[in-house]
Image (tube, coloured by chain):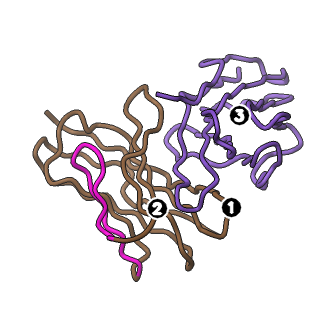
Amino acid sequence: EAEVAQSPRYKITEKSQAVAFWCDPISGHATLYWYRQILGQGPELLVQFQDESVVDDSQLPKDRFSAERLKGVDSTLKIQPAELGDSAMYLCASSIPDRANTEAFFGQGTRLTVV
Amino acid sequence: AQSVSQHNHHVILSEAASLELGCNYSYGGTVNLFWYVQYPGQHLQLLLKYFSGDPLVKGIKGFEAEFIKSKFSFNLRKPSVQWSDTAEYFCAVNPYSSASKIIFGSGTRLSIRP
């Protein structure tokens, strides 16, 4: 069964350092999402791509976060510099861009701890 | 702003009890609706979804949800829960006008006493 792949699974970094997460969506899924999930809360959308274009990054803290999907396939989310409040689970998901079938498939996530 | 509300933060039930988890959304147009489940240590998985047609939707593991448009609700139900249903449950909404954007509620933690 096709899955969304994310790496690393866990990351510990010191504050003010740079950190990057990688996501490989399900083949053929043009829509890719990055969500942040703080413990005890629901996933919050950070950025949404349609192929290589950003569709929505209204909740992305652009002073420190960046995301790219250069060839419209895999994607990287970067934080620089990391802050203590960035500790969370970072989830990647993908879907077919079809209004009648927008089900998102999620990866295992990257748990980030900033110390 | 578009939002999804799950009023029950933590629900504790005994095995075989009936379950109903509330979900309300704030969007007046056409929506797609989802319930996702996150078992301990696992990734988010789709439990069920509503796109159109019969407002009573059946999902995996005996779960069902009813879309009531007039109440902007999509409550999740199961007649008899099992210990293995212990998990976090998230309601999510995709407004048709938002280019596949999926908005999640804050989640409900379900604990089942054996």
User: What residue sits 66% from the left and 49% below the top?
Assistant: A45
Q: CA distance from mark 2 to mark 1?
A: 14 Å
Chain of the residue under label 1: B
Does residue A17 sit above or below A69 in this rendering? above
Horizontal and vertical percent position of residue B84: 23, 33
Was residue B68 drawn as part of the magenta stretch in this picture?
A: yes
Left or right for A40, reference A97: left
Question: Horizontal and vertical percent for residue A58?
Answer: 78, 55
Name the quadrant containing residue A91. Answer: top right
Disc 3 chain ID: A
Secondary structure category for the residue under label 1 = loop
Nearest the eye: A69 or A97: A97
Q: Residue at x 74, y 30 (%)?
A: A74
Name the image quarter holding the N terminus of chain B: bottom right
Q: Secondary structure under badge 3?
A: helix
Span highlighted in magenta in the image = B54-69
Q: Mark 1: few, some, or many residues within 10 Å (few <14, many ≥20)? A: some
**Quadrant where the C terminus of chain B lies?**
top left
Q: Quadrant of residue A78?
A: top right
Palette colour of chain B:
brown
- For residue B33, the mark is 2
For residue B99, the mark is 1
Q: What's the residue type where badge 1 is placed?
A: Ala
Q: Colour of chain A?
A: purple
Asked if marks 2 and 1 touch (Cβ < 8 Å), the reply is no
**Front-most of residues B4 and B50:** B50
Residue at image mark 3? A86
Q: In terms of secondary structure, where does tag 2 sit?
A: strand
Side of B7 relative to B103 (left or right): left
Q: Is residue A1 above or below residue A39?
A: above
Chain ID for label 2? B
